Image (cartoon, helix red, strand yellow):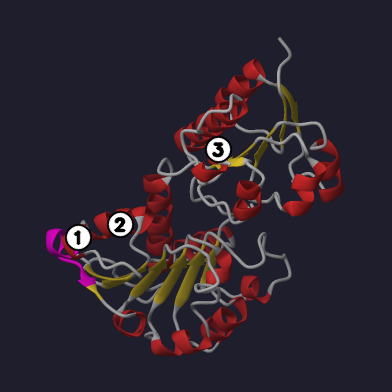
Amino acid sequence: MTKPKVYVTRLIPEEGLEMVKEFCEAKVWEGELPPPRDVLLEEVREIEGLLCLLTDKVDAELMDAAPKLKVVSNYAVGYDNIDVAEATKRGIVVGNTPGVLTDTTADLAFALLMAAARRIVEGDKFVRAGKWKTWGPKLLLGRDVHGATLGIIGLGRIGSAVAKRARGFDMRILYYDIRRREDLEEEWGIEYADLDTLLAESDFVTIHTILSPETYHLIGEREFKLMKKTAILVNAARGPIVDPKALYKALKDGEIAYAALDVTEPEPIRPDDPLLELENIIVVPHIGSASIATRTKMATMAAENLIAGLKGEMPPHCVNPEALRR
């Protein structure tokens, strides 16, 4: 029996890749960087399935170039790189990998919060530069996490997981979300606040909302002015939720104390970006889900979505089930 042709836009963990290769005739882009647009448009011409990453734009142009395409499996929870409405219109199912990275990403967000609070990265650089001469009473003083106020923007799966971790540090927890969670307020002792109140009262602000037209540059110049001068901002959601120019100004002028980012705008951040000249910021390369177990599970989930779509079945994690009813 002829196997369906698929294109995989990056090397993924072996467990998932082997599943794809067993069922499909798979071509894999093995470069470290994403396939160039012209290469991607050429490679999709005969395929029935596409396993892609957030870095691959799957729009009407690509779908026009891939007339046999049945399924797009995104190796990610988010899928803002895919025109889902256009895919649905054409009967192309789209899958993603939700849930699996919740706790792993929450771990990373809390690690960033603590690293910024206690100036861990600065301390490491200080030692490596040969500057550590003796113990000093005022050397690299940071902020206490225990007992501080944490403001969570977006109390979805990841935001809720961060709140659980914060409870272990006896933090006062505020949250802002379009949907109020009165059940969690009572169970966990957390407080709902409007965005302005959250920003004004929080010692730490961590972002876990989706990127949408409503949340684009949600945190900008006005919002930074509302925050405490001692506040620390963590973003482990999507880069464009924070206005990078306003962030630079806020850090440079002392409107806030520190920032820690797993995501940036643009992404990757340019080496000459002025944010990287500042000492009071930590930037890591979008590693929220980067544990061995989580990335492997994402690979198998993406493979399962791809294979189900090729069979004409509903992918286990489908974002547009209506596409199969067309």
Cα–Cα gap, marks 3 and 1: 36 Å
Screen quadrant of the N terminus: top right
Q: Is residue 176 left or right of residue 290?
A: left
Q: Is residue 235 left or right of residue 245?
A: left
Q: Nearer the viewer, residue 118 or 127?
A: 118
Name the residue at 79% across, 52% down: 61
**Residue range corresponding to the magenta coloring:** 184-191
Identify the secondary structure beneath mark 1: helix
Q: Main secondary structure of the magenta part?
A: helix
Q: Are marks 1 and 2 in contact (CB under 8 Å)?
A: yes
Q: Which of pointers 3 and 1 lies earlier in the amino acid sequence?
A: 1
Q: Does 5 appear above or below 315?
A: above
Callout 2: few (<14), some (14-19), or many (20+) C-alpha neighbours within 10 Å?
Answer: some
Q: Amino acid at mark 1?
A: Leu
Residue labelled with disc 3? 324
Q: Nearer the viewer, residue 215 or 227?
A: 215
